[in-house]
Amino acid sequence: MTYTKQYILLFATLLILSSDSFAKKKSRKKKDTTIASIEKKSRKDSLKEEAAFIDAMQSKLLGNYNEAALKFNAIVKENPLNHEAHFQLAQIHYQLGELDLAHSANEKAIEINPNYEWHYLLLGQIKAENGKIDEAADAYQKLVEISPNDIDLYFDWAMLLSEADKPKEAIEVYNLIEERTGPNEETLVQKLPLYQKTNQLNQAINDIQLLIKEDPNQYRYYGYLGDIYDAQEQYDKAIEAYLKILEINPGNVLSYYTLAEAYAKKEDTDNQRKILSEAMNSIDIDLEDKVRIILPVIQQQLSKEQSLDDNNLILDLFQILKDNYPDHPEVIGLISETYQALGETEKALGYLKENALSADPNQELYIQFLFMLSENEHLDDLYYYAQKGEKQFSEDPIFDFFSALSAFLNKDYEASKAAYENGLKKDFNNEALRLQMLVGLGDVSGELKAYDIADEAYEQALEINPNNATALNNYAYYLSVRNIELSRAERMSKKSNLLEENNAAFQDTYAWILYQKGEYEEALNWMNKAMESAKGNPSSEMLDHLGDILLKLDRKPEALKYWNKALELNQDNQKISDKIRLNQ
């Protein structure tokens, strides 16, 4: 916790040289002989003590805290009434985190000199550090008594009372400040949450109205007032206050936002539409702020999980934005993302498609379009628009990636390989994309049996990230297909399964490597794991592998069962057909 006053004495030597820091006046009353003997020290002893104090301060300022502590302890041993030495010891213990010792030394300093401001500043720090916020506040109350004209101390005191969950007491302190400074916004802002906590909203309104009376053209005051009325569900008064803000400060974004919410709470859709339309058309509000104003309305729509076509308000607002900002990427993105969030994918794609077909498409939206096409398996469109984008944004390899990916998914492996190789020749500022393209090149080269190219691509991918689970799995799989380097393939496959658990494809790869090694029982164990991870949706390849493993374990009827299931999913697979025919 940081307070306004700093208790560290950077120029402590100035203090210790003052004549009344150490020299004590002789008392006319008879005192204890020990104390009397201390007070009657010679000037020589006093100078010696001052020199020792300076020496100790030098050690402290150099950060030699343990050495400084020893020196200050020697001083208080000689002169127990030296409150400055006790205070310096307290500071040192505080710096070392020895809060109990710091508190003890500071208490001695206070006992000797109970009206020294710095002692209570340190006491407040120690108490706060120990979590004793109440007692820290008490220390600041004492500080205010010592320095009643220091306004900063009042603010610190009020803050501690707030933290100690004493809102009423904190309000009283802020009122003390206002008695000295007059009503002001700084204290009002601090008091408002305290008023709400103590249910003193009427008092909050009175305070705000006092400020408005002093400065009726300060629009922020009406914002505070509107928020209080809104909290009391007095929406008409809240709206009146928010409208006053727009009168003083046209284009105030927050007022449009709060007005729209207040009208919505009143279920006054006509005025809600009116104020939102005004905001969308305002020349005083930039597009980014208009989006901020409309977002809560969209979020409310998302919470209903209804079709966007059922919400004419949002559609009308979107139309205003489109009219005012034709083909603006932020507007298109907002509309598309809204439809996408509501599950209306085709409409979301439609807006992104408009951008892709325009004469000067926005690159970011174009890439978003390709991602959506990929996620929704619109493979023909993906291939077409990826190639189109590749021509329009020829320097960006991400379009080669999408072109290669779509060709691969359409089983046009030669075109996919060419696109990957073309993209990998370009400059990259995205290593993650480069890694993905290398893995893709390895996969398509494996399908084409161009194993040298595949191996090199996977090796480069693993140089970028040795823990890329997909690269490890796919490389291991193509090694197992060729029945080579099976020990390395097994290590890579095992690592991929550790990196990504319950991945059916990775488990299938590991099972197939074990099959190639002749470990059929263990291979079956891993294939069963893969089938379980597939959750009732195994691939044709997984079913084919399971059939092969079962045949090796002399379980031909079961093998035929899974081969037939594999053929149902991949009816053009001649190898599976041949296995079924030969084993019936």
Image (cartoon, rainbow, N blue to C red):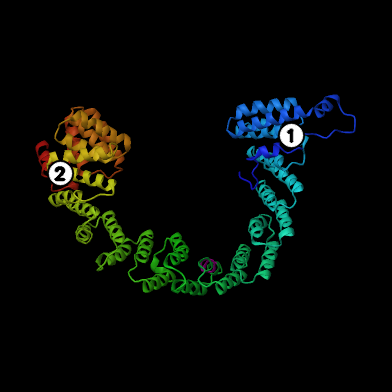
Q: Amino acid at mark 1?
A: His
The percent coordinates of residue 437 (x first, y second) are 22, 47
Q: Quadrant of the N terminus?
A: top right
Q: Which residues are magenta?
A: 256-261
Give me the disc on residue 83.
Answer: 1
Q: Residue at x 25, y 46 (%)?
A: 434
Looking at the image, residue 484 lies above or below residue 255: above
Question: What kind of residue is marked 2?
Answer: Ser
* Local crowd size for mark 2, using a 10 Å CA cut-off: few (<14), some (14–19), many (≥20): many
Label 2 vs label 1: CA separation?
A: 84 Å
The foreground one among 149 and 576 is 149
- Give the mark nearer the N terminus: 2 vs 1: 1
Can residue 554 be seen here?
no
Residue 143 vertical position relative to residue 254 in the rendered view, above or below: above
Place of residue 511 in the rendered image (x, y in percent of width and height, measured from the top left):
23, 33
**Residue at the far right in the pictured view:** 29
277 versus 26 height, above or below: below
Q: In the drawing, what numbered circle is on residue 267?
A: none
Q: Which residue is mark 2?
A: 445
- Is residue 70 left or right of 366 when viewed as pictured? right
Is residue 259 located in the magenta-colored stretch of the structure? yes
Is disc 1 placed on a helix, strand or loop?
Answer: helix
Q: Main secondary structure of the magenta part?
A: helix
Question: Residue 522 in magenta?
Answer: no
Which residue is found at the position 66% from the left and 37% from the top?
A: 13
Residue occupying the far front of the picture: 44
Q: Nearer the viewer, residue 369 or 140?
A: 140
Is residue 228 among what the camera can see?
A: yes
